[in-house]
Image (cartoon, rainbow, N blue to C red):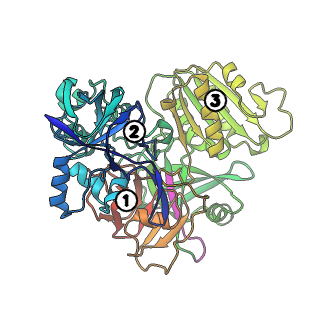
Amino acid sequence: MATLLSVNVGMPKDVSWQGRTVHTGAWKAPVQGPRTVRRLNVDGDGQGDLAGHGGEIRAVLVYQLQSYQYWQKQLGRDDLSFGMFGENFTVDGLPDDEVCIGDRYRIGEAEFEVTQPRVTCYRVGMRLGEPAMASLLVAHHRPGFYLRVITEGRVQAGDEITLTRKGPEGLSVADTDALLYLPDRDPAKLRKALDIPALSPGWQQSFRELATAQQPTQEPGWPAERAATQQPGEEPGWPGFKTMRVARIVPETPTVSSIYLETTDDTLLPEARPGQYLSIRLAVGDAAPAVRSYSLSSSPTARTYRISVKHEPHGRVSSYIHAALRPGDLVDIASPRGTFVLEETTRPILLVSAGIGATPVLAMLHRLAATRDPRPVWWIHVAHDRAHHAFSDESHALLAQLPHAHEHIYYTADTAPHSDDPHIAQGRPTARSLSAMGIPAEADAYLCGPPAFMDDLGSLLRAHGLNPERIRTEQFSALAAINPGITPTAAVRPHQPPGPAGNGPLITFARSGIATPWSPAHSSLLDLAEACDIPTRWSCRTGVCHTCTTHLVAGDITYTTPPLEPPEAGTILVCCSQPTTEVVLDL
């Protein structure tokens, strides 16, 4: 008979960690006497980061006496006391390789249901002073598990734990954890996982993605609005950079020019997927070569790529391209990459852009026109005025080739729209104007433009009824951070790291425009990015959860802690990697 040995609680508090402040409820301690367990937690307990912990599905965390004894030997520790693994219930029995998802247990007056393994999180390592602990819990098949409260009631140390119902499929906590985080997955177990109603929605989504041969895009349990857009991509067409020649430069507007690129050796170019981008490396002045990424703005031919660049007044690279780049110049180009691509479905398509954000969706429009796609297509573009409306004639001609195209142009300047252009309006799209367009709720939407524009239009489209999972966005500035539990601070523009300059290989963060020499003072590429105040994405920091997956544009790395499962080709885990050569990261 299993027994509840200790009830542990702790309210969230601010803890100093690596120069930052973490708001966490990981510091839990035993309490005496009975405690009431309610729908969201134990009385007197709280979670600091409700995005990854807590809520109805993760109300109570369980860890076992036997695992404490195991880690005492493995870590050589004699100071481990109940609650140090962040658990609410320390139990004698209920091993992870026997307890199954969906099992129900009565403890004292309350009844519980097993919903998922522990979320891999750096805070358990922070609490124990063992940075690799998140990885060790998975690798040694001892994660612990969460409970949902079926019946509220009082519990206390000494209560017997009684199994009241066995979960369907018989999939253990340890097997469920390994199914997500470890390689060599058993397809039969994956099918079982998808048939367990009690399994938390976050884990169900990750298993659905695995079932369709996709790497999970985020740590299970993160809400959809925080999903990483740095998803693993396809293996690049060529490694690193190759030299290409500027074939011609075509002005599109007073501030936008298109650059046509061709090979120098007459070889054929790999076909890019509509929506992908190129990274270009240029020597600008005496500084280190700069890397920037620009969407392909048309369907590539066998020998030519086209990118279109807006001149930003303070942009070092865009200023160079517009003022100094000439036909015949040689530039370094990385192969097409990116996951903001036109999907092969039968659903209606919505292409929405603002300003230079038209480039990736224009490539999608080229593909649709080339195949005379029969689906309804809505083209919505926002520009300042007619003079600054890039690709106006080109997009209009492409739309004319589609049997069911709808064109809607908005000019934000105060000048009135042309009366003879019924598809042009003044202002910006609104909920009313979107509704009047007749966009079906089942449409696939692709958005590109300034972040505020994509946020606003995304909200309008969700309110219109579009499935959030079918609203895809692209941006080339640094992505929004995912730093669970870190207390927010004022945003700082990315900069060179403080302290003496390193003398190692050059590290370039392409999205952030920072290039800096590597220094062994940094434990990982993630640590260097943080020292530069570059927005980063991570959860476990030990190579388990893949939240930090980043495209490796060029270079080679080595892992200080080998990932439990390697990321897909062309990507790396920055949380546990260091450079062995010059490196360019899509970060």
Q: What segment carries the magenta color?
A: 278-286
Residue 25 x %, y % = 42, 49
Please give the residue where the numbered disc 1 appears in the rendered image.
575
State the separation of the CA atoms marked 1 and 3.
36 Å
Q: Is 291 placed left or right of 240 in the picture?
A: right
Q: Secondary structure at mark 3?
A: helix
Asked if disc 1 and disc 3 are in contact, CB closer than 8 Å, the reply is no
Task: Indicate yes or no whether the magenta region holds residue 530.
Answer: no
Q: Which comes sooner in the sequence, label 3 or label 2?
A: 2
Asked if disc 3 and disc 2 are in contact, CB closer than 8 Å, the reply is no
The disc at residue 111 is none
Can residue 58 be seen by looking at this rendering?
no
Q: Is 50 placed left or right of 88 in the picture?
A: right
Mark 1 surroundings within 10 Å by alpha-carbon count, few (fewer than 14), some (14 through 19), many (20 or more) = many
Task: Indicate yes or no whether the magenta region holds residue 285.
Answer: yes
Q: Nearer the viewer, residue 160 or 366?
A: 160
Q: Secondary structure at mark 2?
A: loop
Asked if disc 2 and disc 1 are in contact, CB closer than 8 Å, the reply is no
- Where is residue 228, by image quadrant? top left
Looking at the rendered structure, the kind of residue marked 2 is Gly
Please give the residue where the numbered disc 3 appears in the rendered image.
460
The disc at residue 221 is 2
Residue in the picture at 42% in, 34% down: 40
Q: Which comes sooner in the sequence, label 2 or label 1?
A: 2
Residue 308 x %, y % = 61, 50
Q: Nearer the viewer, mark 3 or mark 2?
A: 2
Residue 117 x %, y % = 28, 39
State the separation of the CA atoms marked 3 and 2.
25 Å
Looking at the rendered structure, the kind of residue marked 3 is Leu
State the separation of the CA atoms marked 2 and 1.
20 Å
